[in-house]
Image (cartoon, rainbow, N blue to C red):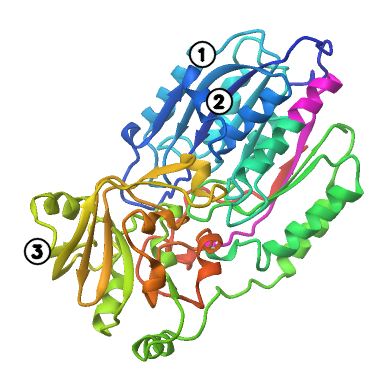
């Protein structure tokens, strides 16, 4: 792909092909993710996402303001989960290919960047390769937005002209990053030339709990990147991509990308110090408020304020099932009162459909989705509430919006009470990124002393403002922060692409 300058600067309304593919794949789970897990939208259905808080909706809104005429492609998205079946990507591609129109001015993609299928460790790179093979797509500008936890591959750098990463974790800026990417593509159209991506991959790979941008090492790396952008007019974008430790892909670790219209310039002058800085920075320990023993004693004597018990080993946002029983067992064992937990347990929710609210009934809770867990907790409890689990996000900038827009469906849900502990049971896995999850089910967190959150970092935007202390639990689960637990087939390949 040596030809990079556009033939002419079109004065007509730009026609932009729009598509999206969004999945973060945990390659070490036992389950496989099939087509039924994905929500596929096609054609004019994409237009309905304008203004919904998602990166796709933000791109449509900003593009329309700039006078773009969209050619609607396909948008496919699913919650983080296990290795994706090959048929999912092939189905997505067949639909995208059918939507393609030769003669468009440009392409805009909304990606996650960490999708892996049974046969493809670099799905986004393969997607770009196939798109560039479509009639009329080889030499037109191609830009887009992607998640900070992507695997940024050499193929992605070579085939995309400008991809813009989220800059915050928790990901409160997903829509903002998409608007920034739209601006980059608009600049390419106005200049009549394409930017390029320079890439530096590293050997560093951190578990999700150490990739928050309010703590080290990401805090300093992001700050350095923004200073470089402000000082050098040749640098349109400098991405700091944390990577995704549970993805078995060569690009899974920390990487940096510079997007620039200067095709004759290398950017080692920035990559070298950034990589050195990343190696030198000490990883801050996960946010915590003391030992587990101290925490239990504090909860037993009724600490003031709400305590967040973070369970990163069962991190739903990284693909875990969200039905781990480690934290629940801890609360039951120590007879902690006024605590609240959410478990993904469609089997129990289904059984409770025939139970009357207010009745006591035997329960087999959680422990069904992962070989790392001890198995279900068998107790007797009271059914407090049951019904639909659709809720409106209380925070439109929640990371949940990047996946679902303004609403999320937990599926049929139920609330049970066991020995002073309130348990929300859902039929759909629900990342704990928005407090609407609780309020929609009649649960007011101000009534509780402890809440279990199955996450690593992305929950903090919602929970930090309302809690007094945070304690990280070391429980069994598929998202262990000890990466030595996992055997990678694809080693990291440090290097880059210009």
Q: Residues within 10 Å of mark 2 (few under 14, many from 20)?
A: many
Contact (CB < 8 A) between labels 1 and 2? yes
- What span is in magenta? 184-208
x%, y% of residue 271? 80, 52
Is residue 194 visible to us here? no
- Quarter of the image with the C terminus is top right
433 with respect to 164 (left or right): left
Contact (CB < 8 A) between labels 3 and 1? no
Residue where numbered disc 1 is placed: 99
Check residue 359 in the rendering and tell me which mark sits there, or answer none. Answer: 3
Is residue 18 visible to us here? yes
Check residue 19 in the rendering and tell me which mark sits there, or answer none. Answer: 2
Distance between the Cα atoms at labels 3 and 1? 53 Å
On screen, 330 above or below 67? below
323 with respect to 485 (left or right): left
Depth order, front residue of 364/1: 364
Which residue is found at the position 67% from the left and 68% from the top?
Answer: 216
Q: Secondary structure at mark 1?
A: helix
Total labels: the figure holds 3
Q: Is residue 493 magenta?
A: no
Q: Quadrant of residue 296?
A: bottom left
């Amino acid at each position: 792909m040596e030809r990079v300058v556009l033939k002419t600067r079109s004065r007509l309304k730009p026609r932009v092909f729009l598509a999206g593919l969004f999945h973060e794949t945990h390659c070490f789970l036992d389950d496989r993710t099939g087509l039924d897990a994905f929500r596929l939208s096609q054609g004019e259905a994409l237009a309905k996402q304008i203004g919904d808080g998602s990166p796709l909706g933000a791109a449509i809104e900003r593009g329309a303001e700039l006078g773009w005429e969209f050619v609607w492609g396909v948008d496919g998205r699913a919650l983080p989960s296990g290795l994706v079946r090959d048929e999912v990507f092939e189905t997505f591609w067949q639909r995208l290919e059918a939507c393609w129109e030769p003669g468009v001015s440009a392409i805009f993609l909304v990606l996650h960047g960490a999708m892996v299928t049974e046969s493809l460790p670099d799905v986004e790179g393969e997607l770009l390769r196939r798109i560039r093979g479509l009639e009329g797509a080889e030499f037109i500008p191609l830009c887009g937005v992607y998640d900070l936890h992507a695997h940024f591959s050499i193929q992605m750098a070579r085939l995309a002209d400008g991809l813009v990463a989220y800059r915050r974790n928790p990901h409160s800026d997903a829509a903002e990053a998409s608007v920034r990417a739209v601006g980059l593509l608009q600049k390419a159209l106005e200049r009549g030339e394409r930017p390029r991506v320079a890439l530096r991959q590293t050997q560093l790979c951190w578990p999700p709990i150490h990739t928050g941008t309010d703590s080290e090492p990401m805090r300093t790396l992001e700050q350095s990147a923004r200073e470089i952008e402000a000082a050098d007019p040749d640098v349109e974008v400098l991405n700091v991509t944390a990577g995704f430790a549970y993805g078995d892909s060569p690009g899974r670790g920390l990487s940096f990308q510079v997007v620039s219209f200067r095709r004759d310039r290398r950017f080692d002058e920035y990559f070298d110090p950034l990589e050195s800085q990343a190696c030198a920075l000490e990883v801050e320990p996960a946010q915590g408020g003391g030992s587990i023993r101290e925490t239990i004693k504090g909860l037993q004597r009724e600490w003031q304020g709400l305590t967040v018990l973070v369970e990163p080993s069962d991190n739903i946002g990284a693909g875990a099932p969200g039905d781990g029983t480690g934290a629940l067992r801890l609360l039951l064992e120590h007879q902690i009162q006024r605590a609240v937990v959410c478990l993904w347990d469609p089997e129990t929710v289904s059984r409770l459909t025939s139970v009357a609210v207010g009745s006591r009934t035997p329960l087999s809770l959680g422990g069904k989705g992962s070989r790392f867990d001890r198995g279900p907790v068998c107790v007797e409890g009271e059914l407090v509430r049951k019904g639909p689990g659709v809720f409106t996000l209380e925070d439109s900038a929640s990371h949940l919006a990047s996946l679902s827009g303004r609403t999320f469906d937990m599926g049929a849900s139920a609330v049970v009470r066991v020995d002073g502990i309130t348990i929300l049971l859902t039929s759909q896995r629900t990342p704990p990124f928005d407090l609407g999850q609780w309020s929609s089910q009649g649960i007011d967190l101000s009534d509780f002393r402890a809440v279990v959150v199955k996450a690593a970092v992305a929950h903090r935007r919602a929970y930090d403002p309302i809690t007094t202390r945070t304690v990280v639990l070391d429980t069994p689960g598929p998202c262990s922060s000890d990466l030595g637990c996992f055997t990678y087939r694809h080693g990291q390949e440090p290097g880059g692409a210009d």
